Every structure is written in C-alpha cells, then in structure tokens.
C-alpha cells in the first residue's frame, strides 16, 4: 500500500510538471513579438504587392515598380515609428525615447515591461523568471501560472489526505513503513505550505493588478518612485482586475498608460462607506 501511495504521488507530480512544461512552452510574452508580428505583416504586404504588380506592357507603356527590399525598408520605418509613437503616448509628455529604449533589444519598452537576462528578451508586464518552467511569467501566461500553482496546491493537499488515511488504517503494522510515510508527509506539508503562500501572494497581485517585479522593486522603477506605498497605480478595482486577468484573452495585449496625477490622487483617497456601497473598491 505504501509503495502504491508513493508511486502514485510521484507519477502525479511528474505528469503534472511535464504537462505544464509543455503547456507553458512558447508562451513567453515578449516585446519582440510585436516587432516580429510587424515584420510578418511587412513581408505579407510585400508579397501581396509583388503579386499585384502589373506585367510590362508590350505596347511600350512604362510601368513604375519598386523593389521589395526598398518597400520593406519604408514599411519597416513606418511601423517602427508607429511603435515608438505608441509607446511614447503611454508616458507623460517630455519623456525621452532614449530612456525607454532597451539597451539589449533596442526596442522601446512600454510601461510594466522589463528585459529578462535569462531569456534575453523584453517581457511585457514582467512578473518573474520561473526557473522550474524555464520561461518568464508575464502578460501572456500569468493566468496559466496561477492555475498551475492552484493545481499543484490541490494535488499536494490530496496526497496529504491519502497519507493521513493510510496512517490511520495501517498504524503500528510495520514501523518502518510508517516512518517513511511520516517523513514524506512532513516533506509534502512543507511544500504545500510554500505553494499555498505563493498562491495567496499571486492572488493578492491579481486583485491589485500588480506584478512581483513592481512590488519588490517599486523604488527602483522610475515611474513608480513618486507613487505612495499603498496606492496601486494600475488597479481598476478588484472585480475589474479579476475579470481582465481571467476572462480577457491573453493573446490580445492592450498597453496600459501611466496614470495621471489626478488619477493617483483619486486612488490615494481612503475609502468611505459611500464608496463601499457604490462599489468603488470593486
């Protein structure tokens, strides 16, 4: 019985980890994906224009054509300018483009993005780099990461219940089997406590629309230095944050602009009974 319990636990943990490693592979949200998408659109536009180019007329009429490489440079320049303008519109007026450009990727970083040295890419809404999954947690997979932690916590809880049930049914049958089960139970309880605390921590981040990087490095991020400690600049209310985190498609990235001074002042105002009744906190 004890061997079956241990084997089932190891198989469940291994299958779960392998399943989520496959599930998370290729889901690292990066700023460079926008550039790759723009480059794909450019190549598609070039191929369409090349197919639509009229053949030279035999009557001697002149057809003006443009080389694909030159057209690509023009389109790339226009899209790069559009991306830079989009990023600049998210920051307060007077912000320098040079201070927003990543020195490694040479890409203008929107707010809440950061360059990950492990992935060597800029990550949108960077939370942290998970060494267990081998990828960054950001805007594209933070919801899946939360469900992963929730599933692992439930799996540990279910295994603890199995161990306790086995000890109650087979106590004092073989002392060395009980010792092994108790040792595994203690180890699993420590892991479950860590996972439960991690789940509560990320649930708090979801309800306040924060990331681990923003919470830990708040004083080092330029656009968060002047924000009071208990003010969450990107929060839209607990219900709205939860809806956007769970229900909005992760493939659609909507850049978040920095809040104005008036919005920060409104968010720093303490809640009153009238605010609770009108669901201002939600």
Image (cartoon, rainbow, N blue to C red):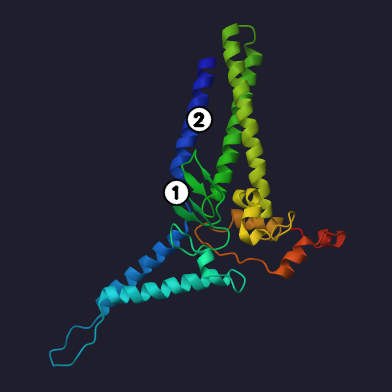
Image location of residue 166, percent across then percent down: 61, 17
Taking depth in this image into account, of 277 and 78 the one nearest to the observer is: 78
- Measure how far apart labels 1 and 2 are at the Cα level: 29 Å
Q: Which residue is tagged 1?
A: 119
Direction from residue 280 to residue 196 in the image, left or right: left
The reply to whether dot 1 and dot 2 touch (C-beta < 8 Å) is: no
Label 1: few (<14), some or many (≥20) within 10 Å? some
Q: Secondary structure at mark 1?
A: loop
Residue placed farthest to the left in the image?
A: 58
Choose top left, top right, bottom left or bottom right for residue 154.
Answer: top right
Residue drawn at 63 percent across, 21 percent down: 186
Disc 2 target residue:
12
Q: Which mark is residue 162?
A: none
Pinpoint residue 167: horizontal percent, then vertical percent: 64, 15
Residue 258 is left or right of residue 19, and the answer is right
Q: Is residue 83 left or right of residue 197?
A: left
Specify few, some or many for label 2: CA neighbours under 10 Å numbering under 14, 14-19, or 20 or more.
Answer: some
Observer-side mark, 1 or 2, equals 1
Above-or-below relation of 176 to 223: above
């Amino acid at each position: 019985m004890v061997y079956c319990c241990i084997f089932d636990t190891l198989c469940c943990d291994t299958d779960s980890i392998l399943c989520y490693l496959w599930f998370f592979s290729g889901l690292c949200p990066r700023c460079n994906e926008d550039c790759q998408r723009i480059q794909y659109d450019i190549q598609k536009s070039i191929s369409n224009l090349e197919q639509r180019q009229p053949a030279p007329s035999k009557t001697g009429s002149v057809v003006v054509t443009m080389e694909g490489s030159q057209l690509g440079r023009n389109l790339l320049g226009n899209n790069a300018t559009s991306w830079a303008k989009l990023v600049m519109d998210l920051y307060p007026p007077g912000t320098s483009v040079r201070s927003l450009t990543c020195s490694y990727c040479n890409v203008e970083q929107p707010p809440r993005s950061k360059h990950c040295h492990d992935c060597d890419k800029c990550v949108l809404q960077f939370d942290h780099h998970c060494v267990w999954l081998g990828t960054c947690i950001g805007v594209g997979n933070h919801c899946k990461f939360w469900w992963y932690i929730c599933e692992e916590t439930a799996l540990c809880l279910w295994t603890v219940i199995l161990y306790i049930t086995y000890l109650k049914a087979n106590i004092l049958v073989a002392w060395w089997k009980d010792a092994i089960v108790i040792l595994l139970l203690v180890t699993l309880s420590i892991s479950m406590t860590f996972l439960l605390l991690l789940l509560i921590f990320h649930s708090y981040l979801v309800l306040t629309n924060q990331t681990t990087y923003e919470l830990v490095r708040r004083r080092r991020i330029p656009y968060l230095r002047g924000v009071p400690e208990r003010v969450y600049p990107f929060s839209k209310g607990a219900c709205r944050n939860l809806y956007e985190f769970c229900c909005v498609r992760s493939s659609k990235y909507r850049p978040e602009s920095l809040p104005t001074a008036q919005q920060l002042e409104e968010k720093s105002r303490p809640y009153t009974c009238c605010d609770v009744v009108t669901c201002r906190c939600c």
